[in-house]
Image (tube, rainbow, N blue to C red):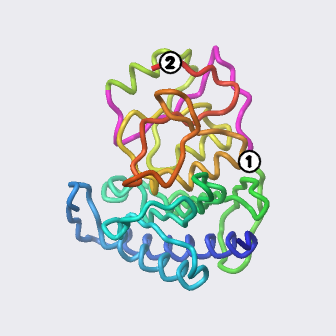
Amino acid sequence: MDFDKLTAVMRELALQAGDKIMEIYAADDFEVRAKSDESPVTVADEAADAIISAGLRSAFPDVPLVTEEQAASHTQTVSTFLIVDPLDGTKEFIKRRGDFTVNIAYVVDGAPVRGVVYAPAKERLFYTNADGQAVEESAPFAKGTIGALQPIRVSTPDNAALLVVASKSHRDQATDDYISKYAAKDMKSAGSSLKFCLVATGEADIYPRLGRTMEWDTAAGDAVLRGAGGAVVRFDDHSVLRYGKPGFENPFFIAHAPGVGLEQP
């Protein structure tokens, strides 16, 4: 893989998809439908998926592509592939809360090695550069021209005063019970894959997820967090989260900065 090309293409497609999403977001109304699993989907999800899929297939025709909006066609298990959630946080989008992202990642042998997370309503853009280092680019974002970049790095956590981030739309009692095992200094809620990025920048130390997620929900944020020195591990045994699993469904997991003393389930 040409990682310079990959970084440029993923960044460009994320920005293009973000423009289309914000165009629909600004409309007075848009259609919301329910998918077969009862999760919501909008025209923004589908339009962003079309932009990203076409761009990736043109640039990398020999690399398998997995996207949320074409999930029904993903019948084969693969270990090296591109994976996309064109609009992560659809519920946040529908409620016009801004915490939604465009996610594009590249997985090699089950590990997400490169990724981009773009939050257009928040004007925050995170990605791994060609060397795999995680960076945040400052707005405004120009297509074809990279702006000011800031390398990002996870915190050095204080286990007596941890910064915790949890899901905004999927918070439950099991999550709260687990969080209560930690000495938390501050607790914040965020939507979509932004939670991974908050850990990557040191704005949070730990993000536990005790709920159903799919690989396209997590791969890009996982790649950014890994590129910032963090990790995402399974909730049950704290082994590293892997990708290319049958059905592309994740177990419960914990995203964290090294140094966090992980509690047992």
Name the element at disc 1. loop
Residue pictured at 46% horizontal, 57% vertical: 216
- Mark 1 surroundings within 10 Å by alpha-carbon count, few (fewer than 14), some (14 through 19), many (20 or more): many
* Viewport quadrant of the C terminus: top left
Real-space Cα distance between discs 1 and 2? 28 Å
Membership of 155 in magenta stretch = yes
67 is within the stretch colored magenta: no
Residue occupying the point 65% across, 59% down: 114
Q: Nearer the viewer, residue 109 or 260?
A: 109
Q: Which residue is mark 2?
A: 264
Q: Quadrant of residue 125?
A: bottom right
Which mark lies nearer to you, 1 or 2? 2
- What amino acid type is highlighted by mark number 2? Gln
Q: Position of residue 249 (x, y in %)?
A: 39, 49
Dot 2, crowdedness within 10 Å: few (<14), some or many (≥20)? Answer: few
Q: Is residue 224 left or right of residue 26?
A: right
Q: Are marks 1 and 2 in contact (CB under 8 Å)?
A: no
Disc number placed over residue 152 in the picture, else none: 1
Q: Residue furthest bottom?
A: 58
Q: Is residue 180 left or right of residue 59?
A: left
Which percent across, then down, holds residue 120?
52, 64
Closer to the chain start, of discs 1 and 2, is 1
Amino acid marked by disc 1: Ile
Which residue sits at x=45%, y=62%? 85
| Range of residues picked out in magenta | 153-172
* Image location (x, y in percent) of residue 255: 56, 37
